[in-house]
Amino acid sequence: MEKIANAILLGLEKDVAFAAYRLPGKKQEVLCVIQPDREVAKVNIEDLEQYSGFFIAPFDSAGDGKMYFIRPDIVVSESGKAPDMEPLMKLPGDVKEDFSIANHEMSKEEYISRAAYLVEMLKDDALKKIVLSRLINMPHIPGFQVTEFFAALQKRYPEAFIFLFNIPGQGTWIGASPETLLSLNEKTAETVALAGTRPMDDMDWTHKEVVEQQIVTDFVKETLENHGITYQMKGPGTSMAGNLVHLKTSFQLPAKLVNGKAGKLIKDLHPTPAVCGYPKTEAFDLIKVVEKHKRRFYTGFLGPWNLNGTNHLFVNLRCAEIKGDEMNLYVGGGITTESDPEAEWEETVKKSQTLLTIVEKL
């Protein structure tokens, strides 16, 4: 992966917009899309199909409907011909902004307290579910090399969407997402309802987890039907994601019903109850109140569209923002009236292991 690693390091040195990624499947090729300048456009989610490139939407795009668009001016692959890197090479390497990843880190006591507050609130409110997140700050990881971390994630999680991106002034993120938001080919499209979490060695689903996943499934069904899109539904079934399993329902859609309305569909799906809550607007507003930290790109979405013959967007989960050898790792869990706050904390601990186990071995 030398060509990709060199492209990543050069992109970071020049602090330009780029995204390196591998679609789910260990046989998929790793690509790196580079825009050799620092002016990253924000475009309307609804206008997705007018562009070709790599898209990155923060969580707050649920409010303003905007996402970042990285142009595929330079595309690097291990197997392809070496592209012309001159536009990138000639850029100065000392123009980085003094960007800080400082954010509020909740203690265990604070997380449990807020989860307990939300459980009680849900009992007397129209809300059915809300997702409470937190971050884990690692101020100094000895010997950390981002390219080694990126390569290790690919090896450890062959069925996840592995990504690393940089947006000047917005930071550098890396992750291994198990959740498709929308994929589209010539014949079919797919979206999924993924929720409920258990450790791999205990797949005895509780009523709480079944209900939690059903809320997401019902939301996806309602959204598709509002767009006049028919679908074939499969599930729910157990889906493996690293050291965890989730309940997953997949929706297969005729591509002809999605073409021309993919952007509007994505805008209405994002953020799903799996990462926000239900009803969506009320949950989104409450999250802004109960979470002291900023989610930034966590629980947004990202992926290539009209790029290299593929159209794939994924929810930004199992992810971290990095600066040098410092990292903020983001995790969260769904809160319902049946939630046990202590168990919700433990679920976030287990989710954090997706990345932490890799970091510890670097």
Image (tube, grey):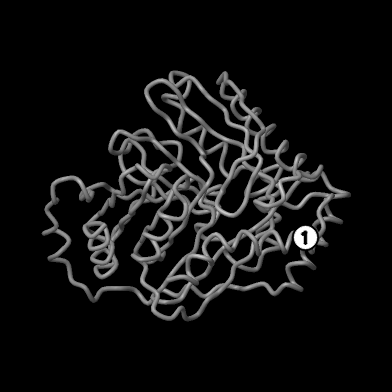
Q: Is residue 60 left or right of residue 337?
A: left
**Number of numbered labels in the structure image:** 1
Q: Position of residue 299 (x, y in %)?
A: 55, 52
Is 195 or 291 nearer to us in this picture? 195
**Position of 162 relative to 250 (above/below):** below
Q: Residue at x 88, y 49 (%)?
A: 124
Quadrant, the N terminus: bottom left
* Element marked by disc 1: helix
**Position of 325 relative to 255 (above/below):** below
Quadrant, the C terminus: bottom left
**Residue 127 visible to the viewer:** no
Q: Residue at x 39, y 27 (%)?
A: 185
Q: Residues within 10 Å of mark 1 (few under 14, many from 20)?
A: few
Residue found farthest to the front = 201
Q: Residue at x 50, y 80 (%)?
A: 139
Q: Which residue is mark 1?
A: 343
Q: Position of residue 193 (x, y in %)?
A: 62, 37
Give the amino acid at mark 1.
Answer: Ala
